[in-house]
Image: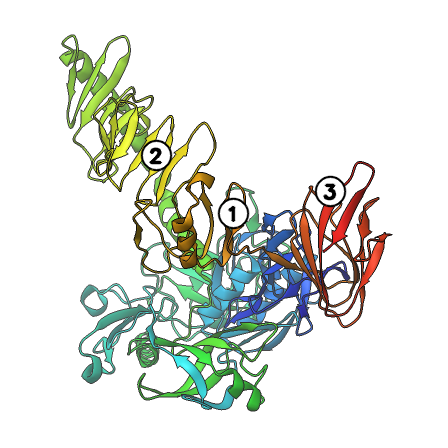
Amino acid sequence: MFALNIYRNDVIIASPEIDEQTTYISEWMGADKVQATFVLDAPIYLNVGDYVLYNNKKYKLTGAVSGVEIDEKTYRYTPVFYGEVYDMYRPIIKHLRRTKFSYTGTPLALLGLVVDNLNERQIGWSIGDVELIDEPQTFNFDQQSCRVALSEIAEKFELEWYVDNKKIYMKKSLGTLLPVTLKYGRGKGLVQASRQSVEQDWATIWYGYGGNKNLPENYRDGLDRLTFDPGYIERNVNLYGDQEGSVTFEDVYPKRTGVISAVDGLNKVYDIDIDFEIKPISDSSAKIVFLTGDLGGEEFVITGWDNNDKSIRFGLNEDKDSGYVVPNESRYAAVGDKYVLVGIIMPQQYVIDAEEEVKRRTAEHAEKNSHPRVSFPLDIDEKFVREMGLIGQFKAGNSVHVVSESLGVNEFIRLQSISFPLVNPAKLTGVVSDSLLSTYSTQERIAKEVRRNKKITSDAQASALFARKTADEIANAAIMYQFLRTYNGDQAVLSGAFVAGNPQDGEVAGINGAGSEPTEVIFWGGSTYANRAIAPYRVQRNGKAYMTDAEIQNGCKVGSFTINGGYLTTSDYSGSGTSGVLISDQGLASRNAGASWIPASTGIGIWGSFFGAVTEEGTTDPSFNVSYSPIWASLVGVEFNKLNSQMLRNTAFCRGVYGSFVTSVKNVGADFWALRWSASSEGDEQMTYDDRLLIVQQFKSGVILPDTPDWGMYVKIKNARGVDITIKGAGTNTIIDLENNVVASFALQAGKTVELVFYPESSAKRWLII
């Protein structure tokens, strides 16, 4: 048995036994968790922060754990313990105590900001190996977690990341090539492999565009974005035909990254290396955008410039909510800060250079995205993993050589995910894919899209809400006007719907022709038009009807049942027939199942019947005129006065597995009871009222018989240990051994079985060994 130690404050609070249902799951730039399933004989309360250790790393609970009580001594739990990367979801990324801010920097600078935020309330976070990129990017953060910020940084710089012992790595390419070839076949590594498509955009003709800043007047006949000649890149057209797509690189536009050479006060800077004259595209369009330094990420309107001394003057930025102004005495431009100018006419050479950059990046994008993406779920041979010494070598992010003629693959492909049982790390399943999946989890992608949509619509929300309220008021007024104008004593007519009502009660019923959804209410009663979806009586377009306090008269049909004279019968039921169902206040008759009658007043009485899972065709017994079948699991009852020789012959066809054949005076045939294994811990095992056969295992030294048995209760105990164990009576209960001696306990030899029955006398309660 394999135990999973669960810790709280470095102390083990539980060690449940686990099997192959407890798995480790790892995804490249994604999930890292231990998904556990175990059963306990007593409830346990797990808290947020409780953890397990795997590969010397902590995996913690981040939320409530659900448990299922199967019975009073069986509790099933399915907790999920998350790796250290999930700690990054807890802190929000902040800058200057703000959670909504712009920040411009390189990958190293951005990771420094992330790590600083992580270490505010946690300890030990640091930066590992990072790709050196000089060109900074600007990010607009708005209450994102550090984990989501990490994904945004990697995606924008087109980098990959992973976290190991709280150290964050970010490079162009991570992971290693495993010197292993997996093929389908015995001893070749793959038990099963399949090919699946991946939902990712691809095309054979990619149109490439850059940003829309600093473009010359009438650029390419009015095109509003940077592009190149001929404007597209073709790849694999001969293989997949014409499939068009487009890609836009907003950060590529005619620009020059300048460096501040001198500063004069808070709002004037110099750049002696600037090699062109500043010419705004329009009034107030020219802006200076700082990329580094205290003003990194800030954009200021240029208020003046001198093309002779290379000076630039710019205005102030004021936060409308707080009144905070930059630059100020604490945040200002400094020598060495980098910047770009936007809203100006750039020299033609800068335009040409930017177009070449768009072309280069479009070609690079086309190379990666010019064929349908596929993934290959793999079931890796457990024996192969063990014999090749590969346990622990397969990790998400590593690449492995996969060969399959039937699937058309023979190349190194990245492991996107891997999973295996903790008790058997050689039993691997994984997914390899030629597609680098997004650095965002599904939840993160949804949240990102929601934020983007909110930003797009935020400026229009107030006016849209006002317009909607105004329209509603106009519509309601029109409805009431039409209602009063057309009122004719008992009805009013509205466009799209007929609404019945009166001036005192208003709308009370109607017929609706508007709407196209299957669930649209077309008839209703007892409510207004607006509340028709919750009316006590309503009928939907799809035929569904809802009624409150409905009275169904005789003769009505409900599915295959008919209501007639207080009885509910199926169409095939008749007084002399052999099939059909009848339900009444006197009981239930079900001839199809073999039961002639179950009366309501006397409990369950069954005659001439066999109940159970049918295992083979039965025959018809002439003396009872009912069908019977061999059974697997059941209770079969026969009235004593019907127990004749024919019925006894019928029992020869009953094959019981879990069940009994009984009459009012005797048992006939086999009788099967449930069994239970004892716990594996030390000490005595207490039998319960529900036990029948107990098998004692491992470290148990004895058994205590049930403390509240019924008259005639029968139990059986099997000693499965290699040593003798002690059988004891509970409380004052005693035992009569095979020599008729009254004892408090006795020894049950290794491998032996004992049967006992409870016999309470007036002065004593005793177990008899039989």
- Identified by mark 3, the residue type is Thr
- Contact, mark 2 vs mark 1 (Cβ under 8 Å): no
Which one is in front, 271 or 406? 406
Location of mark 2 (residue): 465
Amino acid bearing label 1: Glu
Q: Earlier in the sequence, mark 2 or mark 3?
A: 2
Q: Is residue 249 above or below residue 42?
A: below
Rounded to the nearest angstrom, the CA distance separating label 2 from label 1 is 29 Å
- Residue ID for mark 1: 318
- Which of the two discs, 1 and 3, sits closer to the camera? 3
Q: Is residue 20 left or right of residue 703?
A: left
Question: What's the distance in space between the residues labelled 1 and 3, CA to CA?
Answer: 81 Å
- Residue 5, how many percent across, how many down? 71, 65
At 71% across and 68% down in the image, what residue appears?
720
The residue lying toward the viewer, choosing from 158 and 481, is 481
Who's the residue at 48% across and 61% down the image? Answer: 139
Residue on which disc 3 sits: 708
Is residue 158 in view?
yes
Mark closest to the chain's N terminus, 1 or 3:
1
Relative to 302, 513 lies left or right: left
Q: What's under tag 2, amino acid-wise? A: Leu
